[in-house]
Amino acid sequence: MGRTLAEKVWDDHVVRRAEGEPDLLFIDLHLLHEVTSPQAFDGLRKAGRTVRRTDLTLATEDHNTPTLDIDKPIADPVSRAQLETLRKNCAEFGVRLHPLGDVEQGVVHVVGPQLGLTQPGTTVVCGDSHTSTHGAFGALAFGIGTSQVEHVLATQTLPLAPFKTMAITVEGELPESVTAKDLILAIIAKIGTGGGQGYVIEYRGPAIEKLSMEARMTVCNMSIEAGARAGMIAPDETTFAYLEGRPHAPQGADWDAAVAYWRTLRSDDDAVFDREVVIDASELAPFVTWGTNPGQGAPLSESVPDPASFEDASESYAAEKALEYMGLTAGQPLRDIKVDTVFVGSCTNGRIEDLRSAASVLSGRAVADGVRMLVVPGSVRVALQAVEEGLDKVFTAAGAEWRHAGCSMCLGMNPDQLGPGERSASTSNRNFEGRQGKGGRTHLVSPQVAAATAVLGHLASPADLSDAAVSTPVGA
Amino acid sequence: MEAFTTHTGRAVPLRRSNVDTDQIIPAHWLKKVTRDGFEDGLFEAWRKDPEFVLNKAEHKGGTVLVAGPDFGTGSSREHAVWALQNYGFKAVISSRFADIFRGNSLKNGLLTVVLPQETVDRLWKLVEADPTAEVTVDLVERQVRAEGITADFELDENARWRLLEGWTTSASPSGRRRRSPRTRRVARPSSPAPWRSDPRFSLYRAGLARCAAGPRTGGASAC
């Protein structure tokens, strides 16, 4: 019987297999950030261990970093201490670090791919659940806890429990107004936040093959929001074109050999998946969340659902609690929901294509009165590229705030937060209670919807703007 | 890590599904660089509500958390496990846990027990009617027992053995380095090729080394 892509990558990394024990896998790339690593380095220190493979380990600062005044000392002493701890640990253990102010600094899941470190067929781990992002390259990539971070630092291996395989085939073609973010939000709403539990998902089908690398990263990024262990997409010409010429990508004859290897990384035709889900891309529309978990979403054209309409008692109760927290009432059209904040950024939607997408909607328009819009590039490189293309000018001319790179308002560990009761349209990945600030309310959206929402002040898609363009010229 | 064999204590009914890690321990607590001192951050937002179950006098001192489905979704933060343990919980019962949270819990000796939702419902009813009712989580017998309730649960043998022995998989100093007596090594593939240490190429060499060695576990290779 043939093997799936995930099984091939897994099998290629087993360094020890014993009956009744989890397989021990070799890890090709270990990414670190300041939040989930300090206790792991402490463990190494106490045990007198070193970092086994510093050449396969890379750290960046992202969660705590401010997006304003980055040339000044970090105001929050606790954040500053955590970043200083990472710097100290990296210096002591010889780990390469891209700190705040470095040209390669940025959100860890934006930095790995843009450096060409994330490659097909590799195993990638990070103490961060959104490590699933890297699966877009056909890598087996997953988030790990701090105990596992310590284990990988010490041994460059990880014992891992077996997984099940799921194929999500996206047939047809995405309508022009529908983005990768809408697609993944629709998938999560369909299979649920626990639907992927225990599975490595492989996204496939014509609609997936047509996606750019950055769009694929958006899809794989939110696999964890469906509860999956990882998300993957088989590498193809799009993948190779993205990687070619990047700082860590192979060159010359090495490149040709690598591509030959990468081409073998596909699920065999006779491979059997434990579960198969089929989605018709042509039926999709811009999608937004109304609740407090990423599975509580609906097409923008619909209304806030009635909790009583859910068959499952626990889902019904969860919807009731969610509407209470979100301050919404059943039957209210989603388009009528007014926001005070719009956030464009994060490891989900903080890449150059996302910024281009938001800028194209904002160009020649203005952010509505009373709405604060933050645009936070995923990395310094993304920011530089955006400036080169003049996107920063589009954002600032529209009245948005152009900030420095980092995780920012996705989780509000830095000063970029929602206040109690404030409501955002956010291109990030989680709409959990208080995620973006205590008492804050989050609607997950695509960059296009975020930009249209900023212009109109309520949840909206670019299609809603046809008249608004006339009434809200630049500077209005 | 402390060994876990069996635990008996009062239970706390948490009638919520999708209890995500941001609820268990909000992000601003993650700035701490230790593994302890997270107890006050546990369910911080919900604890502001006097009606929240942890604030009710009759549930004070509970050590077994009985939660709705999809407990621990979201972030990989191990701080969620530390917060539950720092607060005093020894076990969490739910019909479904998020994978990363489950893995983290078992590595730290917090026993996460999967039981069918109907059993969870019965436990909720029992402890809501009588908050002093004791619940036993018996890892030796793989069984949860309470008045009128006996429910077997599954846990893979390796994870169970590690918990019973207090054997951590992490490289922390408490990990005793010896092999499980119940397992037998069945295969030992050659260790990965000595890759170039130049970080510019090592990742790429990894792929080439595997390619040159051919597939390890069957299947065709076009390398």
Image: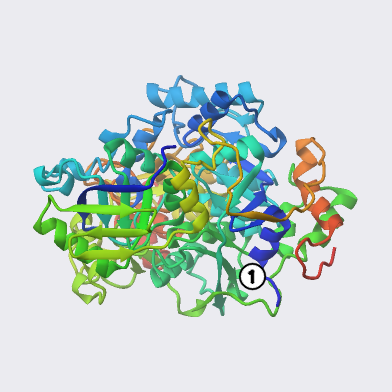
The residue at which mark 1 appears reads as A209
Q: How is the protein colored in the picture?
A: rainbow
**Image spot of residue B61 (x, y percent):** 19, 40
Q: Report the side of A263 relative to A333 (left or right).
A: right
Q: Quadrant of the N terminus of chain A?
A: bottom right
**Image spot of residue A301 (x, y percent):** 33, 72
**Image spot of residue A20 (x, y percent):** 58, 58
Out of B96 and A371, give the one closest to the viewer. B96
The answer to whether any part of residue A400 appears in the image is no
- Judged from the image, the secondary structure of the residue bearing numbered disc 1 is helix
Q: Report the side of A198 relative to B40 (left or right).
A: right
**Image spot of residue B140 (x, y percent):** 39, 54
Out of A159 and B15, give the one closest to the viewer. A159
- Chain of the residue on which disc 1 is drawn: A
Kindly identify the amino acid type of the residue bearing the numbered disc 1: Glu
Residue that extends furthest to the right in the rendered view of this protein? A253
Out of A404 and B173, give the one closest to the viewer. B173
Quarter of image, res A89: top right
